[in-house]
Every structure is written in structure tokens, then in C-alpha cells.
Amino acid sequence: MKERQELVDKEEGMSIRKQCEVLSVNRSGLYYAPVGESEENLEIMRKIDEHYLDHPAEGVFRVQDFLFTLGFVVNHKRVRRLLRLMGLMAIYPLYSRYIVGWGISNSLEAKASIAVMKQAIKDYGKPEIINSDQGSQFTCEDWISYSESEGIEISMDGKGRAIDNIFIERFRRSVKYDYVYLHPAGDGLELYQGLK
């Protein structure tokens, strides 16, 4: 399209209207001069760029919070547009979800998952349904027996349905990029204490 616009010649004997018609070019495109970013947006982009060096996994809402601390009052749409303009995109938080429990284990034994579920029930009450993937810790007899004894219905993501579990996968990614990779721990206890 740009190449065809450049073919339009104001000195040509044919009118600009006719040239545009022949070349299938909109005349408005000939006269429009794009406006660059405002000084404020350029400053915001500089701040975002500096911030991303230390926090590469932060998404739109966390960057918006960061900008608020610097005194910039910007909405999430503006932050998203500037991030896209800069080629920086990360995590989109989902406000419809809330993590009620988490733990760290270096095995897939059910006892660690059951301990997390017991603590979450103690802190927030018993859910009607618990959803998980089909990992061995969630399909074993201990997990199923405990869930049934508590009257909790079990729901599992379908095989090959990785996107069913996308929220928790994004949470894990955030934990890894925001903490684990930046602060390697010597052992599991050090990691747990650092994350707490």
C-alpha cells in the first residue's frame, strides 16, 4: 500500500483523485501524517523499559501499579498499548481466580497436595468441587479418598487439555520468573521461606 501511495505524483497531469482511483489508494492516506508519541508517553515508556530489566514477567496490571507509584495516572488500556508498541507483553491477570493454598514439594506424592488442600480448607472453608489436572498425586487413592470423605466433588481436566489449567500455569511462571530464577535457593526450605 505504501509503495502505491508513493506512485501518486502531484505534478502529474492526471488529477490526484484519478491517480488514487487507478492505484486503488485512499486519498486520506496521502494527507495523513502520523503523530508521534507525547513526551509523557515517551517518559512512561522509558520507565517501563528500565523496570522490565529487573521484572521481565510483569504484565499490564503490575506495570500499571508500578507507574502509579511513580505518579503516572494511566489506565490499563494505555499501558497495554505502550507495552505492545515496545514489543513487551507478559501476563494478563485473571481477577476471577484466587489461589487459596500453595506448597512446594520435590516429589509427586499425594501427601504434599493433601496437606495444601487441608490448609486451604482450614483457612477458607471447604469447596463443593475441586479441579485438578490428571497428575498422579490427584488420581491416587489417598487424594480421592480424602476428597470424598470431605464431600468434595472431584473434577479433572481432560487429557490433552493444557489450556484448562492455564491460570495455575501462568501463576507458576510468574513465581519462577519473579523469584526462583532471580534468587536461586540452596534447598527446598530456603526456597519456601523466600517465597513466603
Image: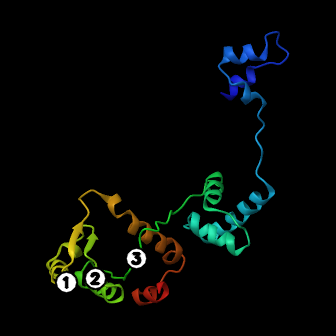
Residue shown at the point (77%, 62%) measured from the top left = 43
Neighbour class for label 2 at 10 Å: few (<14), some, many (≥20)?
some
Q: Residues within 10 Å of mark 1 (few under 14, many from 20)?
A: few
Q: Residue 119: give x, y in percent of width and height.
A: 32, 88
Query: Disc 1 designates what residue?
Result: 150
- The structure residue drawn at horizontal position 28% and vertical position 82%, both measured from the top left corner, is 126
* Residue type (three-letter) at the residue carrying disc 2: Lys
Which quarter of the figure has residue 70? bottom right
Answer above or below: position of 15 versus 142.
Answer: above
Q: Nearer the viewer, mark 3 or mark 1?
A: 1
Q: Is residue 173 above or below residue 1?
A: below
Query: In terms of secondary structure, where does tag 3 sit?
Result: loop
Q: Is 125 on the left or on the right of 10, as rendered?
A: left
The residue under label 3 is 99
Q: Position of residue 184 (x, y in %)?
A: 50, 80
Which is nearer the N-term, disc 3 or disc 2? Answer: 3
Three-letter code for the amino acid on which mark 1 is drawn? Glu
Q: First in sequence, mark 3 or 1: give its number.
A: 3
Label 1 sits on a secondary structure element that is loop
158 vs 186, left or right, is left
Residues tagged 1 and 2 counted as in contact (Cβ below 8 A): yes
Q: CA distance from mark 1 to mark 2?
A: 8 Å
Residue 56, visible in the rendered structure: no
The residue that label 2 is drawn on is 126
Q: Earlier in the sequence, mark 1 or mark 2?
A: 2
Say the numbered circle drawn on residue 130. none
Disc 3/disc 2 C-alpha distance (Å) = 14 Å
Q: Nearer the observer, disc 3 or disc 2?
A: 2
